Image: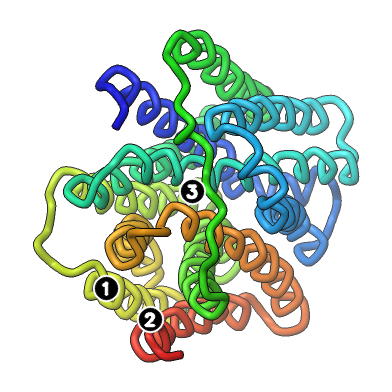
Amino acid sequence: MYDRAMFNGYIILSFLALFCVGLIDNSRGPIYPELLSLFNVTTSNGSLIFSISALSSFVTTVVSKFWLYRFRVLSLTYFALVLMGVSTLMMGLVIKYAPYFSNFLIFSAFFGISIGILSITLNVIINKNSNKDTNRRLFSALHSMYGLSSFLSPFIFSFIFTYSLDWKFYFISLGLLPLMIAFYFFMKLKKLPLSSEQKVGNVSIPLGLVIKLGIVISFYVASEVLVSSRMVLFLTKKWNFSNDDASGFLSIFFLLLLGGRVLFAMKDFNIKSKNLLLTSLMTSILCCILGIFIFPIFLPVSAIFMSYFFPCFMSFLSSEYHYFSENLVAKVMNFVGGAIFIMHYTFGQIAKLLNLDAAFCLVFLMLGTSLYILQFRLHRT
């Protein structure tokens, strides 16, 4: 077990790193219509803005066996933060001074690589520095950081659009944040002794189990990303919302996402993680049906029930598969990038061939599949 100073340092680093991921990743949603106009591309081609970074993130996690077990988790986290900062800075410069779509996609790919690395290392850091009594609360607190930054992102852009400020310059400045965090914690934590436990051990896990768990978490994450990244577009196109009003709904979504995760970070509910996961999936499906077809307010409301799925899933892995949970976290996260890439690409194609309503129905397919596997297939051989 790490001493208290080292424990706090690693935890705070992981919190701030995920805050950066959420702030930058979700900045593309509110400005998505602006990017389509700036680069003069269709909705179908514009989906590459999301799918390219998702693809590179997926490839990065798939080949994690070549880097995860060779380098310290802390070093990998620093590298990913620096790569995120540089790629975001370059994307901002492309938007501001040289608006070429291909150049933007290149730096989006590098941004995706950084997300792929952090998607594994940050969860491993929390898993290493927690026990069965604190696991669910620490994971909830970690992903509250994503919820907080995700909430702030559309709110900031709503403010920028309202007062006609330069959103391009703001996007450039986002690249400085991960660079500053990496530098600060590199100087702070290098004085502490490094433990061999900071490397992840490679152990054998049944492939069927990895696939089932990977599908459950990756389809959930892809569903959450679908709702958050396309909500502004959906509300403006189908329900004739203004960009400002649609961004406000997205802010509500992330506020409720944050609120749910903060609640689970502060209070330890005496409910089995699996029961919480099943409840989350069923209520999320219901809210999305109502939000897409009847009352759009239910789209942001779905965040209440989505909020606790990811931290509860990580706690579920730790409690049910304790002896190899650390390695299992790394392996199941390999699926997330692939699911997000497929979702972005499929969404664009369905929206092009049919309509946005049909494309949004992907969320039912993905959440329903996760629900089916978790309830009926997980413990079958």
Q: Which mark is residue 374?
A: 2
Q: Position of residue 141 (x, y in %)?
A: 29, 42
* Mark 2 nearby-residue class (10 Å; few <14, some 14–19, many ≥20): many
Is mark 2 in CB contact (under 8 Å) with mark 1? yes
Q: Quadrant of the N terminus?
A: top left
Residue type marked 3: Ser
Q: Which circle, 3 or 1, is nearer the viewer?
A: 1
What secondary structure is marked by label 1?
A: helix
* Image position of 343 (left or right of 124): right
- Distance Cα–Cα, label 3 vs label 1: 33 Å
Q: Is residue 12 above or below residue 381?
A: above
Instruction: Say which of 172 and 242 sits in front.
Output: 172
Residue 53: x %, y % from top left: 72, 50
- Identify the residue at horizontal 27%, vertical 73% (top origin): 274
Question: Relative to 192, is 322 on the left or the right?
Answer: left
Q: Which residue is denoted by mark 1 in the rendering?
A: 274
Label 1 CA crowd tier, 10 Å (few <14, some 14–19, many 20+): some
